[in-house]
Amino acid sequence: MFAKAKGIGIAACVLLCTLSLLGSRSSVPPRPRASLALPPAGVAGAVPVRLEAFVVEVNLPALAKLDVSPIGREPHAVSVDDLLKCLDTGQGRVIGGGKVVSQSQDRTSVEATETTYLASHRDTPPGTNYSAYQSTMKLAVGVIPVSETTVSVQFSIAQNLVAHEARTSDGPPATENRSWSSATTLELGRPQIVAATQDSATAVFLVLTAHAQNE
């Protein structure tokens, strides 16, 4: 039984890796089952939990082709498999992510910053002076075991993105700002969509997955 559970945990990691790859894949992998079990809540020296977060942007027409139901209608709500299919066809992209390992009831956070330098159009000749703009991704989580295969997660994610494409004016580049904060219950090793936003052309999804760190 242990060998079987270990193999299933590895399959869960493989599925998460596919979310961060934008290259072609021949098929969408099946959803993994629960990874290695946690001890009961409150047990001293409980196994740490690794939480992985991915922010995925997909085109709305691509979701429509997958027969995803409009907001408020049944029966086909968007799933992680749908997001993977959009990544397969180039109709989606991973625009952020983070990974933290948390002990039971501890609050753990991570932050990443990327600096983009863009040339000013007023320069003569152009490109002799640059302005710096920062993109940031902040992830904070608190994890409490609920059972041997589920955890309760409180999460907070803030994202600030600066457009990398060339500007057409002397103004600053376009930015996108998102902030998600909530609580949910996750089954170990099973990616789950926990939040989403959308505009007229795209939808952005937050996908969380929890893994037991007991190997």
Image: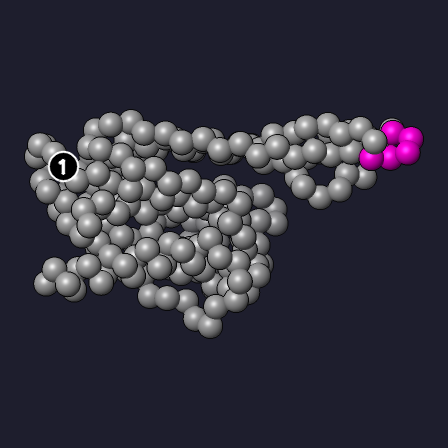
The residue positioned farthest toward the right in the image shown: 124
Q: Name the kind of residue labelled 1 in the image.
A: Ala
Q: Is residue 125 within the magenta segment?
A: yes
Instruction: Residue at 61%, 46% (x, y): give it.
Output: 200
Q: Is residue 64 visible?
A: no
Residue 48, located in which quarter of the rendered image?
top left
Tag 1 residue: 46
Residue 107 x %, y %:
29, 27
Q: Secondary structure at mark 1?
A: loop
Image quarter in which the N terminus is found: bottom left
Left or right, residue 181 beside residue 22: left
Residue 101, located in which quarter of the rendered image?
top left
Residue 202 x %, y %:
57, 49
Region in magenta:
123-127
Eyeballing the image, is 90 above or below 187?
A: below
Residue 58 x %, y %:
54, 53
Residue 122 x %, y %:
87, 29
